[in-house]
Amino acid sequence: MSVAGENDCTVHIFEGEVELQGEVPEATARHLYQGDAVTLRAGKSTAFRADPRSFADPVAIFQAAASASEVQWEKWRARSRSLIEAPGLLAYFDFEDWDASSVTLPNRALNADENSHGTVIGCEKLSGRWDQNTALGFAKTSDRVIFRTTGSTSSITLMASVRVDRFPLDHNSLLSMAAGEIGEVHWKLDRSGRLLLGLRAAPALKYKSWERLESPQVVTPNDFGRWIHLATVIDGDHQEMRHFVNGREVARAPMKRRVPIRLGLTHLGNFDPLTPDSRMVRNFNGRIDEFALFSRALSAEEIAAMQ
């Protein structure tokens, strides 16, 4: 199919059958078979014989796509190798060379201590953005990566390359950190596809106890199965929160309270319940093939360069 505009479409059938739907002129055949072709232009249709020369050779297309993928993967590998030395990087998981028989996921950040390495619970080893790299698949309610950082900080940046497969829950957790403490962080997507951030500023378990940032809808059902880059900044110096999608800022709001961010036990791809018997389910459904946690607020330019 070749689409040149809103009312200009040509369809060639090289194999199988195609059924035309929508606003198709009445005289137009609705079912097309091998060798058929039709142009729909300005409310009129013209039938003719399919011509393979009108389109690029599928083999050439696949070869070009594979070549482009290889180039993009090599660029990402170079960026990944330089990222591990970035200032303020506390945790970096690229999932490369991860042995699925091991529960340990190395924290690639430079000078990371062994306590900050991840522990993989459940999850499936799958392909990432490219055939050459690895992702973790999150599907079951128990799937997650657990790691720990220590101390507190005035600012953080969260970044992840994710593929959403579905939104079965009201809250689909990307990360929860230091649950139950002042300064805990929750990063998630809701059922409508909005990116949400919560920073706990008061002890009471009430809505007003949280500093919040909600984006417009950034993931639709059409985006399921596609890779997107998400980043969120809590900028304590400027008392501001910011969301980014594919390197573009999509939401910003001031913080009403100055809250030190509490580092601690972190659940990636899932929710850390407040109590062992909690029935609150907020697991993520999809894949993650890169995650980074910084103890500083990255600029928009830095985030755009890292996607």
Image (cartoon, rainbow, N blue to C red):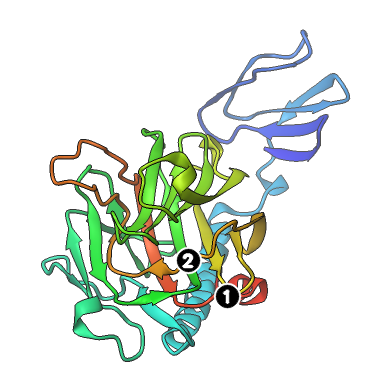
Image disc number at residue 159: 2
Q: Residue at x 43, y 52 (%)?
A: 163
In the displayed structure image, the side of residue 45 where residue 66 appears, left or right: left
In the displayed structure image, the side of residue 275 where residue 167 appears, left or right: right
Question: Residue 305 falls in which quadrant of the image?
Answer: bottom right
Q: Considering depth in this image, is 177 or 191 the residue closer to the camera? A: 177
Q: Mark 1: which secondary structure?
A: loop
Mark 2 crowd level (few <14, some 14–19, many ≥20, 10 Å Cα):
many
Sequence-wise, which precedes: disc 1 or disc 2?
Answer: 2
In the displayed structure image, the side of residue 217 where residue 153 appears, left or right: left
Mark 1 crowd level (few <14, some 14–19, many ≥20, 10 Å Cα):
many
Quarter of the image with the N terminus is top right
Q: Residue at x 74, y 16 (%)?
A: 24
Q: Is the residue 117 above or below the residue 243 in the image?
A: below
Q: Considering depth in this image, is 176 or 141 the residue closer to the camera? A: 176
Q: Position of residue 16 (x, y in %)?
A: 50, 28
In the rendered image, is residue 16 in sight?
yes
Q: Position of residue 234 (x, y in %)?
A: 53, 65
Question: Residue 140 falls in which quadrant of the image?
Answer: top left
Q: Residue at x 36, y 46 (%)?
A: 204
Mark 1 lies on residue? 298
Q: Is the residue 129 above or below the residue 26 in the image?
A: below
Residue contact at pointers 1 and 2, CB within 8 angstroms: yes
In the rendered image, is residue 245 in sight?
no
Q: CA distance from mark 1 to mark 2?
A: 10 Å
Q: Mark 2: which secondary structure?
A: strand
Q: In the current view of this chain or complex, which residue is farthest to the top?
A: 26
Q: Is the residue 154 above or below the residue 50 in the image?
A: below
Badge 2 amino acid: Met
The residue mark sitting in front, 1 or 2, is 1
Badge 1 amino acid: Leu
Quarter of the image with the C terminus is bottom right
